[in-house]
Image (spheres, rainbow, N blue to C red):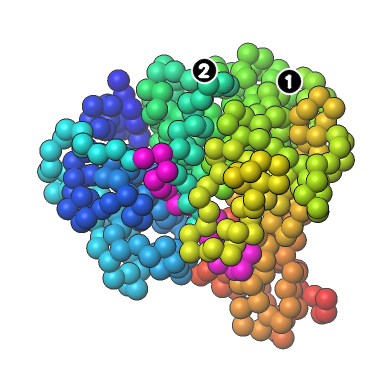
């Protein structure tokens, strides 16, 4: 059965397992052991999936690094994580500051070992991966996710999904965005087919729709912002022959009303809204979007999925009544171990459970309220953090880099929403000389990934 497809290349499950076993043995020659962090610097490709599985099979934990990140951010992640072993594609530029060992994913020499399964098993509490997210201090922070956090997401006693070996999934998102965890393991742990979407195709809704048709994709995972563009493209194309069983939304607030035209075309496709955070392993809540939700127009994120619990608390950590807003806290099996090398921040965000002894709560920083039927309504951020196109962004991190630009004296970054509900960053600044948008974007691109660079810049005489 085909396991992974990338353009004109593919691997069966047997081939994928053999290659991952071979690479895992090559890694073991570098003394890889449990909880050892191994960097993965690669484009979306068959090699990338093999690399991640090989790291897990060798007992390590992978740290995905997006090659589209600025060089400074890549160097920071390598330094902060303490990685001394890096899997990288041949075309990748490894920072000169990295003094560890680099293993080239593309070279045949790393796939010379025995193809049989390794006699090695990670425990549920061993690390699986570390994903870096935006940080309030101006630097990204690594979130420590264990094997049990991921496994219970897909396999529990009250599973909400009927995934199976005949499903075809897309790997649409960057490995550095935890939606990719859901996409990759959702396909592979159920014996389905995983179609890797090339970066250029992902940026073109028309080409993406062609890929969905050509591959017969049945399970699609999307951030709302991108999917609104897919809807408009599908309305233009007028082919209406997609085979999608489920479309699962996450990463940012959903505007259900914008899905109505899609529902009219594909009434049998199940539309599911899921709220989630990296620190609680991808998804937290589940809500099927029907005509009722579309007409209400609320950001209804539903109820906690099995193995997780949600609490809406006030500043004194007391439960809020129904319809009263408060901060959302999460408990259960999905909670990460904490933040890498950040004990103070871990203690601040992963707090002692006030109601259950020995348990923890994760302080999300999100505002919500419970509706009379027990569903949760998302009300936005309680702090200075936003989600745009699924990426979580600390406005403070963007502001810090803006203030580093020569001549900039003051800077504030805000979120603006257009008439279609699309969110965009806008930077307001005061400077000692006139600065062009090109100059500012060029300066910020040295430190920030593309999705964190403001769409608009407004120079003011004074704040």
Residue linked to disc 2 = 162
Q: Nearer the viewer, residue 234 or 426?
A: 426
Q: Quadrant of residue 310?
A: top right
Q: Nearer the viewer, residue 234 or 352?
A: 352
Identify the disc placed on residue 290: 1
Residue drawn 40% across and 27% down? Answer: 189
Looking at the image, do the residues carrying marks 1 and 2 touch, with CB atoms under 8 Å apart?
no
Q: Is residue 197 left or right of residue 274?
A: left
Q: Is residue 16 visible?
A: yes
| Mark closer to the observer (1, 2) | 2
Q: Is residue 307 left or right of residue 413?
A: left
Q: Return the x and y of residue 164 as percentages of the image width and height.
A: 44, 18
Disc 2: CA contacts within 10 A as few (<14), some (14-19) or many (>=20)? few
Q: Is the C terminus in the top left, top right, bottom left or bottom right quadrant?
A: bottom right
Q: Return the x and y of residue 372 as percentages of the image width and height.
A: 85, 27
Residue drawn 60% across and 50% down? Answer: 391
Q: Secondary structure at mark 1?
A: loop
Q: Is the N terminus in the top left, top right, bottom left or bottom right quadrant?
A: top left
Q: Which residues are magenta?
A: 123-141
The residue at the far top in this view is: 268
Q: Return the x and y of residue 31 as percentages of the image width and height.
A: 22, 55
The total of numbered circles placed on residues is 2
Q: Is residue 138 magenta?
A: yes
Above-or-below relation of 134 to 13: below
Q: Return the x and y of residue 63 as percentages of the image width and height.
A: 40, 53
């Amino acid at each position: 059965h085909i396991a992974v497809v990338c353009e004109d290349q593919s691997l069966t499950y047997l081939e994928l397992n053999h290659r991952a076993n071979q690479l895992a043995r090559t890694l073991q020659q570098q003394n890889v052991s449990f909880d050892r962090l191994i960097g993965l610097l690669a484009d979306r490709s068959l090699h990338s999936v093999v690399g991640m599985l090989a790291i897990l099979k060798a007992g390590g934990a992978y740290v995905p690094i997006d090659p589209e990140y600025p060089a400074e951010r890549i160097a920071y992640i390598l330094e902060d994580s303490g990685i001394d072993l890096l899997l990288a594609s041949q075309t990748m530029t490894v920072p000169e500051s990295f003094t560890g060992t680099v293993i080239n994913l593309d070279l045949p020499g790393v796939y010379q070992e025995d193809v049989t399964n390794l006699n090695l098993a990670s425990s549920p509490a061993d690390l699986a991966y570390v994903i870096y997210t935006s940080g309030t201090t101006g630097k990204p922070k690594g979130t420590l996710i264990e094997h049990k956090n991921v496994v219970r997401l897909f396999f529990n006693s009250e599973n909400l999904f009927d995934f199976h070996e005949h499903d075809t999934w897309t790997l649409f998102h960057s490995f550095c965005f935890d939606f990719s965890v859901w996409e990759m393991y959702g396909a592979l742990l159920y014996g389905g087919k995983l179609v890797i979407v090339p970066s250029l195709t992902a940026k073109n809704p028309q080409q993406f729709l062609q890929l969905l048709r050509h591959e017969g994709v049945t399970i699609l995972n999307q951030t709302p912002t991108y999917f609104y563009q897919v809807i408009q493209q599908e309305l233009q194309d007028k082919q209406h022959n997609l085979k999608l069983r489920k479309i699962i939304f996450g990463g940012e607030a959903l505007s259900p009303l914008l899905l109505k035209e899609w529902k009219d075309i594909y009434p049998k496709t199940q539309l599911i809204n899921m709220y989630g955070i990296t620190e609680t392993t991808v998804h937290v809540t589940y809500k099927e979007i029907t005509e009722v939700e579309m007409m209400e127009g609320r950001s209804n994120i539903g109820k906690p999925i099995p193995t997780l619990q949600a609490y809406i608390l006030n500043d004194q950590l007391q439960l809020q009544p129904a319809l009263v807003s408060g901060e959302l806290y999460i408990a259960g099996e999905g909670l990460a171990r904490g933040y890498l090398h950040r004990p103070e921040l871990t203690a601040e965000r992963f707090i002692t459970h006030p109601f259950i002894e020995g348990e923890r709560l994760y302080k999300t920083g999100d505002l919500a309220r419970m509706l009379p039927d027990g569903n949760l309504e998302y009300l936005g951020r309680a702090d200075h953090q936003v989600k745009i196109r699924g990426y979580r962004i600390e406005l403070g991190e963007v502001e810090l880099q803006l203030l580093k630009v020569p001549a900039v004296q003051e800077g504030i970054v805000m979120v603006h929403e257009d008439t279609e509900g699309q969110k965009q960053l806008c930077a307001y600044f005061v400077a000692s000389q006139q600065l062009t948008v090109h100059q500012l974007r060029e300066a910020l691109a040295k430190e920030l990934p593309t999705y964190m660079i403001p769409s608009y810049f407004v120079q003011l005489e004074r704040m």
